[in-house]
Image (tube, rainbow, N blue to C red):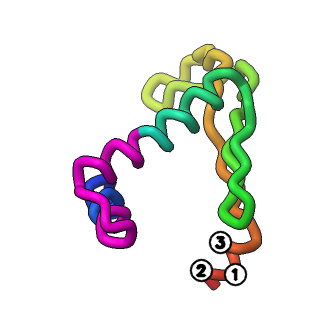
Amino acid sequence: MNKIDLIAAVADSTELTRAKAGEAVDAVLGAIEAALKNGEEVRLVGFGTFATATRKASTGRNPRTGDAIAIPESTSVRFKPGKGLKDAVG
């Protein structure tokens, strides 16, 4: 399922137009993104939790040359599914 499919599913289940459903989906995704940018955790009870995690800087190896390269610190998004989602998926 991609974003277009998600918008269509929301429109079908809520009797909204696809344009309004698209605005709603964009608003939800934008709110999640803004919260994560501020370092906040987004917890959707029964669905799951979105949170950010920082990876420490490390040293890696270039597979072609074997030279050591510096891998900078980075922030990534983590998702932990909730009990309701785990039970629904099986």
**Which residue: 37% across, 72% down?**
13
User: Residue 80's quadrant in the figure?
Assistant: bottom right
Closer to the camera in the image, 21 or 29:
21
Which label belongs to residue 87? 1
Q: Residue furthest front?
A: 15
Report the side of 28 relative to 17 (left or right).
right
Tell me where the magenta segment starts and ends, as one range. 9-26
Quick check: 86 above or below 55?
below
Density class for disc 3 (Cα within 10 Å; few <14, some 14-19, many ≥20) is some
List the residue tagged with mark 3: 85
In the image, residue 68 sits, relative to residue 35, either above or below, namely: above
Amino acid marked by disc 3: Leu
Dot 2 and dot 1 residues touching (CB under 8 Å): yes
Please state which amino acid type lies under the numbered disc 2. Answer: Val
Question: Residue 58: percent from the left, percent from the top?
Answer: 71, 22
Q: Secondary structure at mark 3?
A: helix
* Coordinates of residue 42 in the picture (x, y in percent): 69, 42
Please tell me whether the stretch drawn in magenta is mainly helix, strand or loop.
helix
35 relative to 59, above or below: below
Q: CA distance from mark 3 to mark 1?
A: 5 Å
- Distance from disc 2 to disc 3, alpha carbons, whole Å, reads 6 Å
Q: Residues within 10 Å of mark 2 (few under 14, many from 20)?
A: few
The verdict on residue 24 being magenta is yes
Q: What residue is at 47 percent from the left and 23 percent from the top?
A: 65
Question: CB of mark 2 within 8 Å of CB of mark 3?
Answer: yes
Where's the C terminus, which quadrant? bottom right
Contact between marks 3 and 1 (CB within 8 A): the answer is yes
The residue at 69%/81% (across/down) is 87
According to the picture, the residue beneath numbered tag 2 turns out to be 89
The image position of residue 44, as x and y in percent, is 69, 54
In front of the other: 57 or 22: 22
